[in-house]
Image (spheres, grey):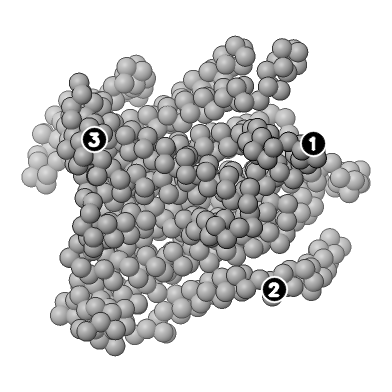
């Protein structure tokens, strides 16, 4: 029953308000289109480009430092130019975006899967459980996620040996960013659970002795999930920034599978000698990606919760 | 007020103990610092000797007791990488970070509050819309990208300002300040702007939304109906009522400045605590990492405490509540 009515609610919502609001917001359309392009181009990179920028054998040092195609010495084959080792910048950006998107999405999935259960348990049961969970969340919220992720990553760096670290770098990054950002999802789902708990249908469910775990999973979770997901959209943008920052600082993904942050770090060494394109294009791609995701998040928030405007 | 202060102080001490325990636990069961410190030619006997000398062979309880006792005195052992006392290293680096954070905090709060007021009071003007679009871009621009951009424009292309270091510093009894020389100020401008920009946009957006919220309330409408001066309404009534969230956010943002200074210091090769910490992470320099963790936690706890106490100053309701014996 619940799943059917929930599905119906969802369908009617798509029929009316959301679709209407989406089609009447040029910003949202453009942002969604750009984000979609990033997804298709980055995950389709092996089909779109013939370059394999991170296979050392395919690189030729003679191709190094070629400027973008529209400069005097540019080549059409390397549209956005190459870096010092002859890597095609455009191809590197495509593969780098793939890493950035993967880390960003998976770490938010992890934060949600820690945050929602803890938040719902805190909000539904209240009392000591609530105090304990939320006190930990409060303490963690006062420290910026990037610092926590840096700490976890630093610890992992010392636990795993150097050769092993290259293999586990991306999972470690996902875990550290995921752990660093769970409290905000716990807060939202907690307040949602506290509201739902007092409603009549929950009282009815308890009256017919529905097991507590079923009440939580079937009734509370679906009602809390939506608002959390809206916040999670902006969370993806934040996670992408944190990942890029860690990689820029040299403690994120290894140079063998660079993300956008690593590419910017590599290019940063060359801006003093005038090879601006090596760092500019990855940075531009990163900002464009984050901006689009932020705009979608803003639009979702305004559409579903006009009060927050 | 006094009981509240004591309660909050007690909580702060608890948090600090927890962080100290965490930093001790994390960094005492992690990796083998010796292998990171020595070259490949070092013999096992030499490695064992070094291990003994740094006290890494002692039992857990001894190490934890020593850690707590030393931490209270500000001693965090000897850096594995630089082979010097960590408190000395941090004391050397702290002025650079604090001066950078101070100037950024001033820039971020001044411009953030001003911008928030302007956009909140006149939300429909083109100026507000311009600032607001800019602020969204500011949130989407990672700190290090802003830094690189500023370096490229002002240091590489225009050659106006230096791109790294602190310039000339003057030693004021152990506190080496860059505020005293022109080159010190010049070196400070780009990093301070880089660090301030993100926090500024956050403060701006919070103040704006709070102002918009308050201006919609009945008591503001009533004040308008009474024919009070616009300035009195805006600053005497509206701004005053936005202060609580503003203080909270500003306080937290000043705290974040210390954390974000890690990034800015890396981009501008600023010789502060943040770059010391990043090198510590890269070389598994456990004493430096744990000292930094405890120090940053101390900053955050102190700022939170100050923010909580400031609530009493700006919100009279809290004071009367306590007098009435509700608390």
* Figure check: B320 above or below A66: above
In percent of width and height, residue B14 lies at 51, 22
SS label for mark 3: loop
Nearer to us: label 1 or label 3 = 1
Nearer to us: label 2 or label 3 = 3
Q: Which mark is residue B41?
A: none
Q: At 20% from the left edge and 62% from the top edge, which residue is drawn?
A: A272
Left or right placement of residue A155 versus residue B53 in this view: right
Left or right placement of residue A81 versus residue A120 in this view: left
Q: At 66% from the left edge and 62% from the top edge, which residue is drawn?
A: A300
Q: Which residue is mark 2?
A: A24
Q: Earlier in the sequence, mark 1 or mark 3?
A: 3
Left or right placement of residue B42 versus residue B24 in this view: left
In the image, B193 versus A156, the foreground residue is B193
Q: Which residue is mark 1?
A: B226
Q: CA distance from mark 2 to mark 3?
A: 53 Å
């Amino acid at each position: 029953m619940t799943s059917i009515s929930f599905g119906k609610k969802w369908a009617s919502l798509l029929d009316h308000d959301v679709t209407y609001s989406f089609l009447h917001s040029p910003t949202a359309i453009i942002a969604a289109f750009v984000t979609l392009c990033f997804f298709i181009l980055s995950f389709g990179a092996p089909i779109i480009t013939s370059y394999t920028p991170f296979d050392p054998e395919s690189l030729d040092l003679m191709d190094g430092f070629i400027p973008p195609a529209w400069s005097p010495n540019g080549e059409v084959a390397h549209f956005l130019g190459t870096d010092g080792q002859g890597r095609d910048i455009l191809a590197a950006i495509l593969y780098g975006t793939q890493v950035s998107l993967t880390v960003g999405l998976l770490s938010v999935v992890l934060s949600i899967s820690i945050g929602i259960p803890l938040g719902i348990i805190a909000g539904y049961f209240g009392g000591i459980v609530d105090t304990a969970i939320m006190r930990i969340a409060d303490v963690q919220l006062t420290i910026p996620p990037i610092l926590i992720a840096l700490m976890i990553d630093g610890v992992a760096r010392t636990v795993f040996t150097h050769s092993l670290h290259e293999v586990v770098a991306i999972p470690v990054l996902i875990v550290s960013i995921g752990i660093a950002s769970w409290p905000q999802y716990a807060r939202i789902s907690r307040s949602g659970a506290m509201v739902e708990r007092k409603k009549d249908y929950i009282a009815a469910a308890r009256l017919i002795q529905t097991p507590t775990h079923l009440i939580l999973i079937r009734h509370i979770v679906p009602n809390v999930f939506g608002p959390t997901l809206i916040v999670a959209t902006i969370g993806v943008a934040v996670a992408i920034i944190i990942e890029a920052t860690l990689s820029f600082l040299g403690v994120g993904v290894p140079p063998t599978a660079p993300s956008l942050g690593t590419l910017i770090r590599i290019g940063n060494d060359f801006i003093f000698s005038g090879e601006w394109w090596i760092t500019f294009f990855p940075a531009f791609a990163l900002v464009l990606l984050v901006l689009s995701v932020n705009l979608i998040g803003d639009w979702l928030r305004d559409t579903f919760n006009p009060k927050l405007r | 007020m006094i009981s509240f202060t004591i309660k909050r102080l007690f909580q702060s001490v608890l948090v600090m103990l927890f962080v100290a325990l965490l930093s001790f636990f994390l960094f005492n069961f992690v990796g083998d610092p010796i292998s990171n410190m020595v070259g490949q030619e070092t013999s096992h006997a030499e490695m064992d000797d070094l291990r003994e000398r740094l006290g890494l062979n002692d039992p857990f309880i001894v190490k934890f007791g020593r850690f707590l006792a030393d931490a209270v005195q500000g001693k965090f052992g000897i850096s594995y990488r630089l082979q010097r006392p960590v408190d000395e290293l941090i004391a050397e680096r702290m002025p650079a970070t604090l001066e950078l954070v101070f100037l950024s905090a001033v820039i971020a709060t001044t411009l953030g509050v001003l911008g928030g007021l302007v956009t909140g009071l006149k939300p429909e003007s083109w100026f507000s819309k311009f600032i607001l679009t800019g602020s969204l871009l500011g949130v989407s621009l990672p700190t290090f990208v802003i830094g690189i951009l500023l370096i490229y424009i002002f240091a590489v292309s225009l050659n106006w300002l230096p791109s790294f270091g602190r310039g000339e510093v003057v030693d004021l009894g152990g506190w080496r300040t860059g505020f005293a020389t022109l080159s010190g100020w010049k070196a400070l401008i780009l990093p301070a702007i880089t660090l301030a920009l993100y926090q500024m946009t956050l403060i701006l957006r919070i103040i704006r939304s709070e102002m918009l919220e308050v201006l919609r309330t009945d008591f503001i409408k009533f004040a308008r109906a009474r024919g009070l001066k616009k300035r009195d309404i805006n600053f005497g009534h509206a701004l005053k009522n936005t202060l609580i969230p503003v203080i909270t956010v500003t306080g937290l943002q000043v705290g974040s400045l210390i954390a974000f200074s890690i990034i800015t210091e890396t981009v501008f090769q600023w010789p502060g605590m943040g770059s010391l910490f990043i090198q510590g992470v890269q070389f598994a320099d456990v004493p430096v990492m744990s000292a930094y963790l405890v120090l940053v936690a101390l900053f955050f706890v102190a700022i939170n405490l100050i923010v909580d106490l400031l609530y009493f100053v700006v919100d009279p309701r809290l004071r009367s509540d306590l007098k009435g014996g509700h608390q």
